[in-house]
Image (tube, rainbow, N blue to C red):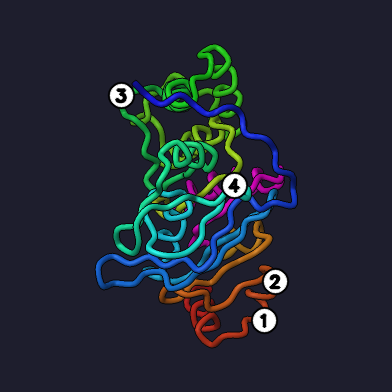
Amino acid sequence: MRPQPDPALPDPGPAVPVIEIEGLHKAYGTLEVLKGVHLTAPRGHVVSLIGSSGSGKSTLLRCANLLENSQQGRIAFEGEDVRWRGEGQNRHPADSRQVTRIRTNLSMVFQSFNLWSHMTVLQNVMEAPVTVLGRPRAQVETAARGYLDKVGIGDKADAWPAMLSGGQQQRAAIARALCMEPRALLFDEPTSALDPELEQEVIRVIRALADEGRTMVIVTHDMDLARDVSDHVIFLHRGVIEEEGPPDALFDAPQSERLRQFLGAVG
């Protein structure tokens, strides 16, 4: 029997960040990927994570959503600390219901779409709200069609994922995330698997969501996207925050030599 969803969460107010991470450490065996990282995502803000491959960006995002266990540090969702059991490599969340509640309120959009091939686009978008949250099917279908319209593929509701372009599949994945009505959206390199033309389709949707005041944390290689939509940008290098701040400060007046090198290479 699947766990019953928790009651609707109370709104803690705009002063409480949706996500707070303090002193996070993550290692795979002897390979230390994150070395004491901090991140705060206030309500209605967009935080972008940039950095070279292997800097720890995607790992940080997966730790925030509890898809990966960290070995040390604090993770809090809307002021509620994740409860842990064990220490070091044996540390894991102590409360499975808390994990479920947090994950259902932090919808993640992956690089590789992850749509179910045996379901139509509409069925993909509806599946989690119906089966995980237990919402009425008719209500979810109305919402799902609305979100598909929002991302510009309402006419593809009855299509199979294989019939869609990569950009359309990623937009379907965004609609699926939105249909959970989460407190925040997490994007892990949402455009890196797309060619430039299809990439722009997805970027337009992300920009529109930012304009709506959605709380988002975005791992991206697209510096224009990070500059345009972010309230705060974090530059990770070898598992630590090398530099962070408002996008204009980071992109126009980088303080660290490593960030200057990185921007010069990707510019």
Q: Using a 10 Å C-alpha cutoff, classify the residue at mark 4 as few (fewer than 14 neighbours), some (14 to 19) or many (20 or more).
A: many
Residue at horizontal 51%, vertical 67%?
50
Element under disc 3: loop
Asked whether 1 or 86 is in front, the reply is 86
Circles 1 and 2 in contact, beta carbons < 8 Å = yes
Task: Answer with mark 3 or mark 1, whichever residue precedes in sequence.
Answer: 3
Circles 2 and 4 in contact, beta carbons < 8 Å = no
Task: Answer with mark 1 or mark 2, whichever residue precedes in sequence.
Answer: 2
Amino acid identity at mark 3: His
Task: Answer with mark 3 or mark 4, whichever residue precedes in sequence.
Answer: 3
For label 3, the residue is 118
For label 2, the residue is 248
Task: Answer with mark 2 or mark 3, whichever residue precedes in sequence.
Answer: 3
Distance Cα–Cα, label 2 vs label 3: 45 Å
Amino acid identity at mark 2: Asp
Asked whether 205 or 114 is in front, the reply is 114
Residue at horizontal 52%, vertical 80%?
264
Q: Is residue 6 above or below residue 229?
A: above
Q: Is residue 13 left or right of residue 261?
A: right
Q: Which mark is residue 253?
A: 1
Q: Which mark is residue 206?
A: 4
